[in-house]
Amino acid sequence: MALGAGRVAKALAAAASRGLGNGEDDALRIVRTGSRGAFWLEPLLEVETPAGRIAYGPVQPEDVPGLLAAGLLKGGAHRLRLGPVESIPYIRNQERLTCGRLGVVDPGSLDDYRRHHGYRGLEAALQMPPASACELVKESGLRGRGGAAFPTGIKWRTVHDAVAPQKYVVCNADEGDSGTFSDRLLMEGDPFCLIEGMTIAALAVGATRGTIYLRCEYPHAQAALATALAAAYENGLLGTDVRGSGRAFDLELRLGAGAYICGEETSLLESLEGRRGQVRFKPPLPALSGLFGAPTLVNNVVTFATVPAILERGARWYREYGLGRSRGSLPIQLAGNIARGGLVEKAFGVTLRELLYDYGGGSRSGRPIRAVQVGGPLGAYWPESKFDTPVDYEAFAQAGGMLGHGGIVAFDDSVDLAAQARYAMEFCAIESCGKCTPCRIGSTRGVEVIDRLRAGERPAMQEALLRDLCNTMTHGSLCALGGLTPLPVLSALDHFPGDFASMAPVAAARS
Amino acid sequence: MTGQAMPLPVAERAAVLDAIAANGRLQGSLLPVLHAIQERLAWVPPRTVPLIATELNLSRAEVHGVLGFYHYFRQSPPGRRVIYLCRAEACQAVGAVQLEAHAKQRLGVEFHGTSADGRYTLEPVYCLGNCACGPSLMIGRELHARVTPARFDALLGEGNGEGEA
């Protein structure tokens, strides 16, 4: 949409209202789908033909008359014609276990969702006792896709076993990590899938109320979810009697207000209770004492959206994909300085190198990729020597990094890693909730120490001080913000020490 | 307690009372209430805090604390349009730092500032989720991708300062 799909749709609708030229009277119905996630081909236009959907892209409004003249509506030849969508290697080679409907369905249409396997997971869930649904999710090997990778089924079971008059399910849709957008694409392109997943979860753990906590930076996702929620209520899929089961589930949408820390689950709960988003001490776990003190299941968008397929196809189907203890697939996001950026959902096990070059096509600038940051602003900066690491939670941790929410940000050789390390500390200072000292004060001191180090002021001492400070933040912070900010800082320092020397050659060579 | 405060402007009082009428019964209603006020007024005037607190049965300190905690809530009026410029890593990798410098110079402001003609307020944002097509910015609720300095100037010229915020 940000690339001008709206203007293309307008141009197409305008041409249609004038008659389509060529004397053709073919009926034209424009459906605004979500994104397939192949951004370098966008705006992407697909035409339904007897031979399947034919893709054209990237289309600009001024291309529309030429496309129509070339027989666009029959899949005619044109320089922008990409052939059948499913044959584009970038899309064909993916394993879209979670994101299969993205770009395919009309996100505003419940009927369309149902035609594409929608609500079959809920049907299956209604046929089994709640504990069995928890067990099935556990068997699938699904882990929290927000980044912490906690086994989802175990969390569900904990909330299920808690005894309380009121329980909640909460969707963490505060996708604040730079380089990540899979939650956004899912909510914009397949909002019913999230609603179905949350409904299954609520029935499984015994919750009657749920909330989607969405960041306010996503107005289009907000609109798509609001439409889908209204349709689900109208069709008896939410409310006092879900799908005629006699069981209630009310789901509401709440907006965040620009605080990164609210992606941390306990500060998210504080925010939902109407307070400053300050993290809580754990224990107690939110699963036992969460929203308003009640047992609360908090999962990420991708986690919930994966559940319907698992319920429909079975735990074994999902578990057969993957590597080691990372089962299933991960919607990976290729971002930053990358030629073919977008969403690539693959089974765990694909390597960074395959993602960066086979899918990503190298840097957008055409210069060598010098570093990547995986896992958002709290993820490590890695040099090329680590590009053969497979996408797997344990492999990443072992290599000194973090897979997180699966965002990969590529940087070419113009990057200054000392500046990136400084930014990591600055970001932590801006977004710290202020509750614990290592994060609140340490981040500001961190910026100062890096500034002195880069200025060449007794560098050996500054480096020792920086490492000591990072040690304090790692071990003394309450949550992952202060606890993991040292990861980008120290990985930059360890792998790219030259950038920290004053008058470093790379820094000097920056244009 | 401080002395007698100035009465609230009518529009602000109405915005607060309407926001509370629509959202006040929600559990943990303060954020929805503040969102509704800001949607109507484009900011949340600090002088409305006592009224919000009284109506929601909260202390002024609680309301003030929440208002100040969240970056999105504004305590001063913005220009006619707010430009949210992404500063995060994925956009940095494709020129966001240069775009930031250009935007500040072009508008004659630092972050959080409003241009002298009152048309634009420049705000940093930490990710718009458009990380494969940076540098990104949002004007009002419109997202724009691959924004070069030249494209930035063109966006300003496309009447983006004229409509409602």
Image: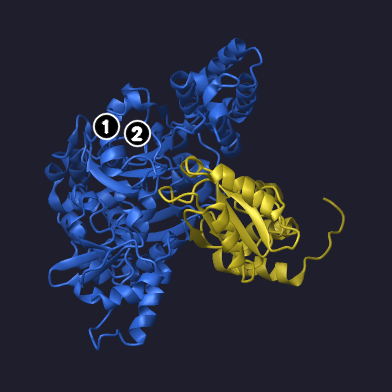
At 55% across and 39% down in the image, what residue appears?
A278
- Report whether mark 2 lies on the same chain as mark 1: yes
Image quadrant in which you'd find residue A119 = bottom left
Disc 1 chain ID: A
Q: Are marks 2 and 1 in contact (CB under 8 Å)?
A: yes
Density class for disc 2 (Cα within 10 Å; few <14, some 14-19, many ≥20) is many
Disc 2 chain ID: A
User: Mark 1 — residue?
Assistant: A392
In the image, taking residue B80 as reference, residue A336 lies left or right, namely: left
Is residue A64 depicted above or below A373 in this figure?
below
Q: Quadrant of the C terminus of chain B?
A: bottom right
Callout 2 amino acid: Leu
Q: Is residue A276 visible?
A: no
Q: Is residue A144 visible?
A: yes
At 37% across and 73% down in the image, what residue appears?
A9
Q: Secondary structure at mark 1?
A: loop
User: Mark 2 — residue?
Assistant: A403
Callout 1 amino acid: Asp
Q: Secondary structure at mark 2?
A: loop
- What mark, if any, has residue B116 been given in the picture? none
Density class for disc 1 (Cα within 10 Å; few <14, some 14-19, many ≥20) is many
Q: What number of labels is visible? A: 2
Expressed as whole percent of the image width and height from the top left, the position of residue A466 reads 57, 18
Which of the pair B72/A285 is nearer the observer?
A: B72
Image quadrant in which you'd find residue A290 = top left
Which of the pair A509/B142 is nearer the observer?
A: A509
Colour-to-chain, yellow: B
N-term mark: 2 or 1: 1
At 43% across and 35% down in the image, what residue appears?
A412
